[in-house]
Amino acid sequence: MDEILPFLLAHWPLSLAFLITLVAIVLYDVLERKGGAKRVNCTELTRLMNHEKAVVVDVRGAVDFMQGHIIGALNVTPETLKDHQAKLRKMTSRPIIIVDHNGNTIGPMLKLLTQEGLQVASLSGGLNAWRQEGLPLTTVDE
């Protein structure tokens, strides 16, 4: 135990990098929890879609959406939200699951949909996780 402080001082650049990384991880986790967004995995999303009529909102661009998306998903970006507001307001009793490429860029849409009074969650790992699970995608816009 007495050797920790001399080690940290002798290797201060690595110690500082470790401390900064640790603070960043804790801060990211705290901010994510503060946002209030629940994260669901692929299995939970499938259950929500089948039993609670969850609505999947894909926030990727139109080109990416056309190349492959979860069956029944709506393509709603922050720029096209106004076009879909009336439709989404009718779904206030249904869970809304936001999907992007990797689960990390849903912030703006999460905020907008939460302000609309919707029950919002995000798919952990995004569409990449969905693909890794081998779950079906469609290229046909329904």
Image (cartoon, grey):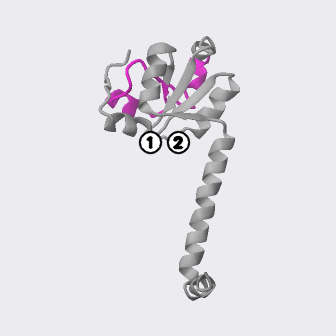
Report which quarter residue 106 is drawn in: top right
Q: Which residue is mark 2?
A: 105
Seen from the viewer's position, the closer of residues 79 and 120 is: 120
Real-space Cα separation, disc 1 to disc 2, in angstroms = 8 Å
- Residue lying at 46% horizontally and 18% vertically, measured from the top left: 49
- Where residue 3 appears, as percent x and y from the top left, is 58, 86
**Marks 1 and 2 in Cβ contact (< 8 Å):** yes
Disc 2 secondary structure class: loop
Amino acid residing under circle 1: Asn
Residue at (46% x, 26% y) in the render? 45
The residue labelled by disc 1 is 102
Q: Residue 114, relative to residue 104: is it above or below?
A: above
Residue 131 occupies quadrant: top left
**Crowdedness near tag 2: few (<14), some (14–19) or many (≥20) residues, C-alpha within 10 Å:** some
The quadrant of the picture occupied by the C terminus is top left
Query: Which residue: 32% across, 26% down?
Result: 137
Circle 1 residues within 10 Å: few <14, some 14–19, many ≥20: some
What is the magenta range?
57-85
Residue 11 is situated, as x and y percent measured from the top left of the image, at 55, 84
Q: Position of residue 58 (x, y in %)?
A: 47, 29
* Depth order, front residue of 38/72: 38
Q: What SS does tag 1 mark?
A: loop
Let me know if residue 73 is in the magenta part. Answer: yes
Q: Quadrant of residue 133?
A: top left
Residue drawn at point x = 52 percent, y = 15 percent: 52
- Residue 75 within the segment the image draws in magenta: yes
Q: x and y percent of residue 118 in the render? A: 64, 22
* Above or below for 95 versus 32: above
